[in-house]
Amino acid sequence: MKFYVRTYGCQMNVADSDEMGRHLQARGLVQTEDMDEASVLLVNTCTVRQHAEDRAFSEIGRLKKWKLRQAGRKVVITGCAAERTKEYLENRFPHIDLVVGAKSIEDFGRIVDGLLERRDTDEDLEYAIPATNDRVSAFVTIMRGCNYSCTYCIVPYVRGRESYHPMEQILSEVRDRVAEGAREITLLGQTVNSYHRDGSKGRDTDFADLLENVAAVDGVERIRFISPHPYYMTDRVIDTMANVPQVCESLHLPVQSGSTPILRKMLRNYTREQYLKLIDKLRAAMPGMTISTDIIVGFPGETDEDFRQTLSLIEEAQFDWGFIFKYSTREGTPAAALESFSHELIEERHRECLAVVDRIALEKRQKLLGSQQEVLIEENTFGRTRTNYKAQVTGNVLPGETVRVEVTNAQRTTIEGKVV
Ligand code: SAM
Ligand code: SF4
């Protein structure tokens, strides 16, 4: 029996999909990239913005036909939108067999057992050897949930309060991923660098300890992490990043806004000045590192002056790339009670902001022309630099190999180069 997974949203969801996939594989199911071959179809949804939710729901609607084409097919809906709208989904789409919200991902194995027992065809489970995950770059979830309450954000409602995985569990997962072929490990959590657990040495184990321990696992060549929160970007974490060779010189550090009054209304727990100071510290500790960010435009009450502050912060921080999001009202969040801006104004600010981010990103990429970069090959001739640029290389390469590449074209977001 085969299963197919469609994932919407962030890396956290990609990691959750992998985890659920492993549960299905442990029960003898085999993953397929072809929906038509599958008997179980899993849609892992996102609800961070309305647009993401709408896309998932229209796909779920279309699955009715897929299900009818073969007896015994199962539709499983999981993730953040599933958590938020379980009842609605079950009523609106009766062809759904199972809804598993984001808070229950860790119980997925047990929950899905019930579904697989309810087989209504005599199609045999294909007890093949579970396929291993051969990704060169693997995700490892270190925490779930979020204790922040950024006023625009639905995540704490659908993923619940923070819980941290024990260090030993994380290291064992890292070892598993390395044994399957991973060379690069990305640690995942909503405020990933707030990680802490009771330590054995009389003090808490923190994120810096975790980075050191992951680096000590044989075979780990690169470490990344998302999403760090600026508040927990302590000197100790920065020093560890700079001193542990496996930690890559790249950081995605969401800022959301360049205006302190808006940051306050968002409850982000830092000011414009503190954020910029942090960027200076990071660049001083790791010269040549790349820093990227997330920005929300059109948060309720964002004045023209607030918006200009965001544009000027982008110039000052010199982000290497960034994701600009149009504010999307999420029912139940504090910001939903505030009056939102017109679609046109949000579109206009989005265009303007994107133009600034893209211009700086291109200027920074152009500086890479002619330079040599270390690229870890992930698939065919595609890989990534330590600074997290996607790279297409010319030369004889194999997945898992690290090669030196001279950059020949940096016009697009995926740079090009030849092996030297
Ligand atoms: N936990 C991460 C952090 O605090 O940096 C971010 C998690 S969230 C899934 C990813 C991004 O979605 C955020 O950084 C934010 O820019 C964006 N986002 C969250 N809620 C949003 C909303 N209501 N409208 C638009 N963008 C939103
Ligand atoms: Fe949402 Fe803020 Fe938590 Fe990130 S830190 S998941 S933006 S509430």
Image (spheres, rainbow, N blue to C red):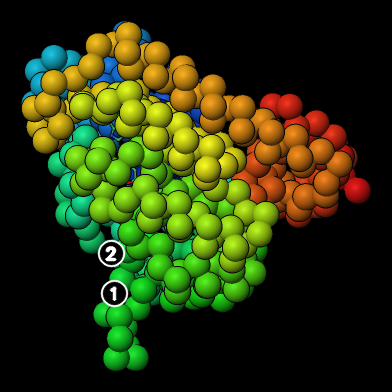
> Would you identify the image quadrant in which residue 333 lies?
top left
Identify the residue at the far right of this view.
420
Q: Front-most of 392 and 151?
A: 151
Mark 1 is on which residue type?
Arg
Residue 149 in the image: state x and y as whole percent: 18, 47
Any part of residue 183 in sight: no
**Number of marks in the rendered image:** 2
In terms of depth relative to the viewer, which is nearer, 401 or 315?
A: 315
Quarter of the N terminus within the rendering: top left
Marks 2 & 1, CB-CB < 8 Å contact? yes
Q: Which residue is mark 2?
A: 164
* Image spot of residue 216 (x, y percent): 56, 76
- Relative to 128, residue 242 above or below: below
Query: Tag 1: Cα neighbours inside 10 Å, few (<14), some, or many (≥20)?
Result: some
x 36%, y 74%: residue: 206
Q: Quadrant of residue 365?
A: top right
Q: Residue at x 78, y 50 (%)?
A: 373
Left or right of residue 230, residue 383 in this image: right
Q: Position of residue 89 (x, y in %)?
A: 15, 22
Secondary element at tag 2: strand
Q: Amino acid at mark 2?
A: Tyr
| Image position of 147 with respect to 364: above or below | below
As drawn, which residue projects farthest toward the front? 305
Residue at numbered disc 1 = 197
Q: Determine which quarter of the picture holds residue 347.
A: top left
CA neighbours of label 2 inside 10 A, class few (<14), some (14 to 19), many (20+): some
Q: In the rendered structure, which disc, 2 or 1, sits on the residue that comes first in sequence? A: 2
Residue at coordinates 20% horizontally, 55% vertically from top-left? 147
Q: CA distance from mark 2 to mark 1?
A: 7 Å
Q: Secondary structure at mark 1?
A: strand
